[in-house]
Amino acid sequence: MNLIKAFLAIPVLVILLIPFLQTKGKGLVVYAAIVLNAILSGYFAFQSLSGQFLEFTFPGSLVTGPVNIRIDALSGWFILIINFVFLTGSFYGLFYMKAYQNQKNNITIHSIAFIILHTALISLCVVQNSIVFLIAWEFMALSAFLLVIFEHEKMATLTSGINYLIQSHISIVFLMIGFIWIAIKTGSYDFSALTAYTTEHPGAPGLFLFLSFFIAFAIKAGFVPFHTWLPYAHPAAPAHISGIMSGVIIKIGIFGILRMITLIKVDFYTVGLIILTFSVVSGLYGVMLAIVQHNLKKLLAYHSIENIGIIGMGIGLGCIGMGKGNNWLATLGFAGALLHTLNHALFKSLLFFTAGNVYQATHTLHIEHLGGLIKKMPQTSLLFLIAAIAISGIPPFNGFISEFFIYSGFYNWMKEGLVGPLMTIIFSVLSLVLIGGLAILCFTKAFGIVFLGNARQKFHHEITEVPFLQLFPLYLIAFLIVLIGVFPQFILNTLSQPVSLLAGISVNTGMPFQDQMAGILQPLTWSIWIFILIVALTFIIRKFFILNRKVVIEPTWGCGYVEPSVKLQYTANSFVRAYSKLFRPILMTSKTAEEINGIFPSGGSYETHIYDRIEKYLIDNPIAAYKYLLGRFLFLQNGRLQFYILYGIIFIVSVICIPIFYDQIMTFYEFIKQI
């Protein structure tokens, strides 16, 4: 209890202290607070993951009633992920934010919002009271908004932040619908009321309740079609905030869905099919749009949607396993979802941090303007490559392991042999295969265009690698990416408790989680090590044969052109031209071109821009229709004083006359109803 009070006291003290500190000291104090709170919350998280159930009760207030704090294995898993991403992100941010040291007021707000965000995210993982949960959710939304709009002098950044804030509050509306429904029916704000009510009222009420919460959390997670805020907010934020948003903020939506699975008693087979459908669409749509992006951070943002889809596939499989009483299917699904949540937090934060390095070095994120950075920034290039291979699900890195669990779940479900489920499995597996293939295409383009070849434009400043201390947290993330990929068994002990909680099985009885997981991972691990040895042996043989040979560097053949130009290289658009033509019916493409005329043309241009079709139909068109409707009433606000006086007179007369003629009005109203 005292440790929890200390956890809440540290942010309050830091927030009061930050305005009085020098600009350079604000970041150090915030980082120290993050470290202390990570130690305190991590202590409880490790206890919960070792099988110790922790619960505390605070007095609360007359409105909330007693407030229960519960730290179970699911909370512990997400707390550790949040803490790790915040520790690496805040350390990276100490160096990234040096370029903004002259913005004292912005740094102050940024620092305060950062510590509030960390506290709110940890609180959401442990709070068991709906009112306090909504308050923590609002703190999270507002603090993240302030972090996104750090460069608020840019109109695009401010627009992206407001878009995020509005959709965050739409999420809160759906949360309130679910919580108010339960409060009316049970008179309780405690999460246990969800279980009690849905146990007594199975069927449609439980499904309606779950769908309300699912939509709320799906907006935060970025499931399609609730994703439209994400591709704007991630690129607008500073790099360390982008990494944290993709690494853990959208994951709190995943946590919310998983928490509701543990609380609401519903037909899990139906729920699983619903989640699986949303997830397959999200995975495919996210990666399809990622491929055609020209902004590096926007490309990464769409890949967050893709990976949320992969996580959702695991959750859907887990729910289907629960609904069918297939414990092994539920275990594989939830294990894949939880592990991919961790894996995505690692490689996606690493990708955003390396993108931040690129931006600091070049002052641009436009892929078409970059190139050849591997010569100038070799360490950043290597780290980006590791994360790119991991996110593509290629061994021997961590993304392959979690996707392997999900594939194994589909193959286990295939044993059922019925036609309906079999068609669902085939389509889902093919979708997962297509997602992986398109991800490889996308990151081949991203790495090749940004880091290989020659620079596509001249920079007026020297491009250099960032300092090693700024790279240090990135190397730490890369180490975990490789470790999980090469030694996946070490994570099983930590994963067993949350998976058992979600699947509703005991770790001591029933299915031996670690034994069965180790059984499917052992041949996989041997295969990975054989692959590593073959690659290492190939490099050794190559080194041996060229040891005594002179290495000669010659210019690349210029295809017969007398004067080679960097414009002869592939562009990001030309690299994926065949893909763009193949998926043209799905992609919404606009073109701007300047035609080349004359015998000796002086110039020309050709640009393509891809827009989100779902955003156009679900966001842009309804807003345009709403603005059109309001425009029909512009005559009321015509700027003429006489009309405004007339409105006032009409209002006063109405206030006087309505009470006098109330009986006649009601009689006329009843007459109209009868007609």
Image: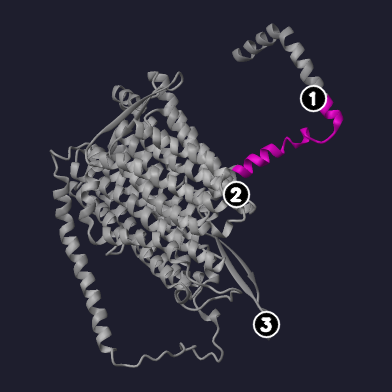
The residue carrying mark 1 is 647
For the record, the magenta segment spans 623-645
Which callout, 1 or 2, points at the residue further toward the start of the chain?
A: 2
Q: Residue at x 75, y 37 (%)?
A: 634
Q: Quadrant of residue 553?
A: bottom left
- Label 3 sits on a secondary structure element that is loop
Q: CA distance from mark 1 to mark 2?
A: 44 Å
Per the image, label 2 sits on a secondary structure element best described as helix
Amino acid type at mark 3:
Pro
Lower position in the chain sequence, tag 3 or tag 2: 2
> Is-magenta flag for residue 567?
no
Dot 3 or dot 1, earlier in sequence: 3
Question: Label 1: how many residues lie within 10 Å, few (<14), some (14-19) or many (20+)?
Answer: few
Q: Position of residue 491 (x, y in %)?
A: 24, 52
Q: Which mark is residue 525?
A: none
* Disc 3 to disc 2, C-alpha distance: 48 Å
Query: Are the residues flagged by discs 3 and 2 in contact, CB closer than 8 Å?
Result: no
Residue at image x 27%, y 45%? 334
Q: Evaluate whether residue 368 shows in this view.
A: yes
The residue to which callout 3 is attached is 601
